[in-house]
Amino acid sequence: MMHELRKRGTTFGIFTFSMLAVFIGLGVWQLQRRVEKHALIAALTERLAAAPAALPQPAQWSALTPPRDEFRRVRFAATYASGPDAMVYSSGSAVRDDVSGPGTWAFLPARLATGETVVINTGFVQNTMQDRDQQDRAVKPLLTGEPVTLTGYLRFPETAGTLTPAENLAKRLWFTRDHLAMAHALGWGEVAPFYIDLEQPLPANGIPKPGPLDVHLKDDHMQYAITWFALAGAVLIAFAVWWRAQRLAQPFRDQDV
């Protein structure tokens, strides 16, 4: 009987402390993620609030990376190319307070004075519902053939998820902001590895609608950490209650023996 009790106690103890290690590890990981998220929010907030700088030189483009350069604010002159535009379906924006869906983002290639092509997200077209005619009418006034000074933010292409619908080439419609795929499919030629989320200028009729970006990253890590630590505490309490019950019952088992 005593041997059986020790065996059960050892098994339950191993299980308990294994779960404690898992729950405490997850709690500590959430606290670390919280520190990283706060640092990211601070960095993005600083970049978005900074005065616009010159667009990096083409020789520097290959060295740009999302962790270091995403959301950098830039200003430069370019001429919208007359090639086909692309639209990206959206139900809203995590970085634009003034945008709600449904609608599409209007993407256009623009040529720099030095000959390179940079893709521009020219802004949001409300309630297009994937309407190609409405999108065409929205971007046509931008194609003046004259250079225009653009202010915006460096962004990098997204990767489609497993459930993301495939692009519709007949409508020139995408469901991820993958400007490199757009350029390949629509014959825009070689383009910069980043695209520009346009802030200014605003077209006379307000369509497409560019605008400033703002940081709205979820920060639930403290709540998650508390949950994991609470589960660790609950497991420890459950083991203590079980162990105390076993100790209290031991004299009665000894009498039975």
Image: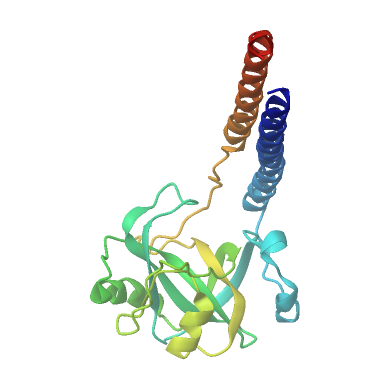
Residue 177 horizontal/vertical position (percent):
48, 69
Q: Residue furthest front?
A: 257
Quick one: quadrant of the C terminus?
A: top right
- Compared with 211, 88 (above or below) is below
Q: Residue at x 56, y 47 (%)?
A: 215
Q: Residue at x 32, y 61 (%)?
A: 103
Q: Residue at x 42, y 87 (%)?
A: 83
The residue closer to the viewer here, 141 or 134, is: 134
Residue 132 horizontal/vertical position (percent):
27, 76
Residue 97 horizontal/vertical position (percent):
44, 46
Quarter-of-image position of residue 72: bottom right
Q: Residue at x 66, y 45 (%)?
A: 37
Q: Is residue 79 visible?
A: no
For this view, does 92 lie left or right of residue 43? Answer: left
Q: Is residue 3 visible?
A: yes
Quarter-of-image position of residue 140: bottom left
